[in-house]
Image (cartoon, rainbow, N blue to C red):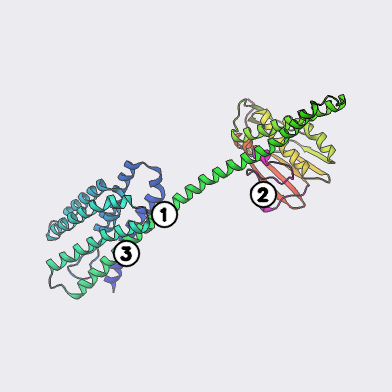
Amino acid sequence: MNILLEDIQIFLLNLSFVFLLYFLYHKFIERNTQRISNEIFVGLISGLSIILCMTFTLSPVSSFIFDMRQLPLIIGALYGGRRVLIFLFITLLSYRYFIGMDEGYYASVIIYSILTIILCYLIPRFTKAIKIKHKVKLAAIAASFGIVLILILIFLISPNASPIKLVSTVVLYGTQFFLILFFVTLIERARMERMIFEELKKLEKLKIVSEIAASISHEVRNPLTVTRGFIQLLRESNIPDDKKEMYIRLSLEELDRAEEIITDYLTFAKPSLENVQMLELHDELQYVLKVVSPYATMNSVNIHFKSAPNLFIAGEKQKFHQCLINLAKNAIEAMPQGGDLTVNIEQEEDKAIIRIQDSGVGMTEEQLSRLGTPYYTTKEKGTGLGTMVVFSIIKVMQGEISVNSKVGEGTCFTLVFPIVSNE
């Protein structure tokens, strides 16, 4: 009973050698290397697996020794190519010679020489195969030849072998046969899933680009259409001067709106900082709140400002203002019936924290998860670009942004920036 348990442990140990090494290769190495490097890694991993399998062998019956060296040999050859096959063939026979020169050594030379010739024939067909079932079929042919060669040799060397020995041979090598098919299927499915995942990432990027393009074209077309209409009206000779002034003013406003949309898009697409300087948060926030205070007054919103002086961060003043004005305007627009806009500046260790809190309508979990993504806005008239620009500017300034919100209670944007020394 103890011998049986030891044999099972050694069998599982052989299997774990092969599985662990190939798992590490296909999970972390294959996608990050070129063809030659792949061959080297496959050769080293397969060679190491062969040596480990041949080191830990099991003997279910007397004079019969089994290990799973064929599994890494066949898998490594099929996925590594002919050069890897030659390397594995030399490794296997060299280690077998190191273990001991006996009649089993010469038997190994015969078996694996024939198997190597068969694999040389199958490797190009395996490489060209596209469907998984074709690759599994070729792996099955290689594994079958390996088992048949072993069985023939056993019959030649031990024509009067006991039934237990024959049954053990068939069961163990039959198990190895199905494990080879399992490994090929597993590797191919993992490759297919990775390819599908990479393709989905590409499609997601294209989808984002198309959504942004649709958003930009739609939003820019509207002010241009309005401007074109006013210019056509200006061609009429009987229009009063006050009407002309109104048409010109409205046309310029629409063109300014189109320029703002394009600027937001470019800021999001390439959020770089050009004129980085020291920014004192108290002064910058005070300036921003002065800019938005008329808009807040129009919407019956009261602004509360609490500051911690002498906190400096690094950034570009214009884009930092753009970021804060966008957040303040969004907060004001989230309070259609009026409310309170609270802006606090705090310090925690080496971080400066800006909290912009409103008492507006708030957002659901689903809205929060989509905040900052292309073509998404909670406003009836909006492109979603403003919030995207905010996220981009904060990221390029080495800052962090988090949002907490409850429906009916309001929303709080928390911006965290590293503090820099005034010196």
Disc marking residue 178: 3
Rounded to the nearest angstrom, the CA distance separating label 1 from label 2 is 34 Å
Of mark 1 and mark 2, the one earlier in the sequence is: 1
Task: Residue 103: say if magenta.
Answer: no
Q: CB of mark 3 within 8 Å of CB of mark 2?
A: no
Return the x and y of residue 405 as percentages of the image width and height. 71, 49
Return the x and y of residue 389 as percentages of the image width and height. 65, 37
Task: Residue 375: say if magenta.
Answer: yes
Of mark 1 and mark 3, the one earlier in the sequence is: 3
Residue drawn at (75%, 42%) of the image? 331
Quick check: 65 above or below 18? below
Quick check: 206 above or below 60? above
Residue drawn at (32%, 64%) of the image? 178
Label 1 or label 2, whichever lies nearer to me, is 1
Helix, strand or loop for the magenta stretch, by majority: loop
Q: Amino acid at mark 2?
A: Leu
Image quarter hosting the C terminus: top right
Q: Which residues are magenta?
A: 360-388
Q: Quadrant of residue 57?
A: bottom left
Disc marking residue 368: 2
Q: Secondary structure at mark 1?
A: helix
Disc marking residue 190: 1
